[in-house]
Amino acid sequence: MNQTIMLTTTNCIEGFKIDTYLGIVSESIVVGTNFLSDLAASFSDIFGGKSRSYQNELSNLKDIAINGLIKKAKGKGANGIIGISFDTDEISGAGKSMFMINVVGTAVKITQKDDHSMEALSSNVSGDVVSDHMQLKTIDERFYQDDFQLTMSEIDLLLRYNLLAKIEYFMESLKNIKVTLNSAEKMRHDYHISSLINYLGKEERSEQILKFYSVIPKYLGLREEINRIAKALGLVDYKRLLGWLNSDNINLQHISLQILKIIKYEYSSEDIFYCQSIIEFLKYKYSENSLEENEKKMEMCVWKI
């Protein structure tokens, strides 16, 4: 069974109490700086797209480090990590340049203080619960407006009541924020993404993939955001991605190639089968010259399995 991990940079998690401190966990990622740009360019060049910036690749590596941190915390029996912090450094020498990212936090065992789920409401409810219920109804009604956007308090409300069926609300709000995204909106944009990661992280892995992949085709303009969420949670469905690569929708193809670059920590026999199928599909669909580098990357992925 997939265990939920709550993540925070603070020393506590609102609505939960810390039962046990299980110790410090850390994860380090070291890569060559030229590897970042080469990896970004390898798949996107198939369709004439642009490789992402160095800053975006750094953000992606942070997501990989977080995944490693989560795996180590789970190994200790934790369901939460508090006090998370990042440290980055560039290591140079002998004509080579390497980049190191280190993430550290404290693994903890937590329990929820109170059961606030809407299904558990008794006949005697507080005024706060009634107010929350009314606000949820207002969000439902606003969703169909063209400029729908969630406020931070509304996001907190959706997280508190664990309404996983509302993933589309996050995506729609992100889509509308991105239309006019500026430095003032950046914080709210990033808060949406981190909240959605926590939102999906409360569910079983199979349900995470089912819910997340079901909304992707409707929000193809959120390529970077979709990739960040998929990386943070390790949501790689090779079977679905192979189908998307074989579709006529070039945006779905782009997103599929982005997600394929995510390194999973565990691979099933089904994963291996569909990885090989993807390699054969790309060989067949494109010329050897255009796929020479991409094939090497894909085969490296399978070799690591």
Image (cartoon, rainbow, N blue to C red):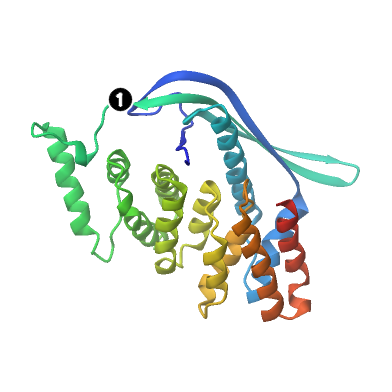
Q: The residue tagged with tag 1: helix, strand or loop? A: loop
| Quadrant position of residue 154 | top left
Examine the rendering and report whether any part of residue 253 can be seen: no
Is 264 placed above or below 113 here? below
Q: Is residue 13 above or below residue 189?
A: above
- Please give left or right for residue 267 compared with residue 30 in the image: left
From the viewer's side, name the closer residue of 241 and 105. 241
13 sits left or right of 137 in the view: right
Can you identify the residue that label 1 sits on?
Answer: 113
Q: Amino acid at mark 1?
A: Lys
Along the line of sight, the residue nearer the viewer: 109 or 179: 109
In the displayed structure, would residue 127 be above or below residue 192? above
Residue 191 point in image, percent of width and height: 41, 45
| Residue farthest left in this picture | 123
Count residues near mark 1 (Cα–Cα under 10 Å), then give few for <14, some for 14-19, many for 20+: few
Specify the farthest residue to the front. 269
The residue nearer to you, when weighing 205 against 113, is 205
Q: Is residue 133 visible?
A: yes
Q: Position of residue 48 (x, y in %)?
A: 64, 75
Q: Percent x, y for residue 145?
A: 23, 64
85 displayed left or right of 197: right
Residue at the spot 12% in from the left edge and 31% down from the top edge: 126
Q: Name the outermost residue toward the top.
A: 20
- In this rendering, the count of numbered labels is 1
Q: Residue at x 55, y 51 (%)?
A: 231
Q: Position of residue 31 (x, y in %)?
A: 75, 46
- Residue 39 figure quarter: bottom right
Q: Residue at x 75, y 50 (%)?
A: 33
**Placement of 162 over or under 237, stated as above or below:** above
In this picture, residue 55 sits left or right of residue 293 = left
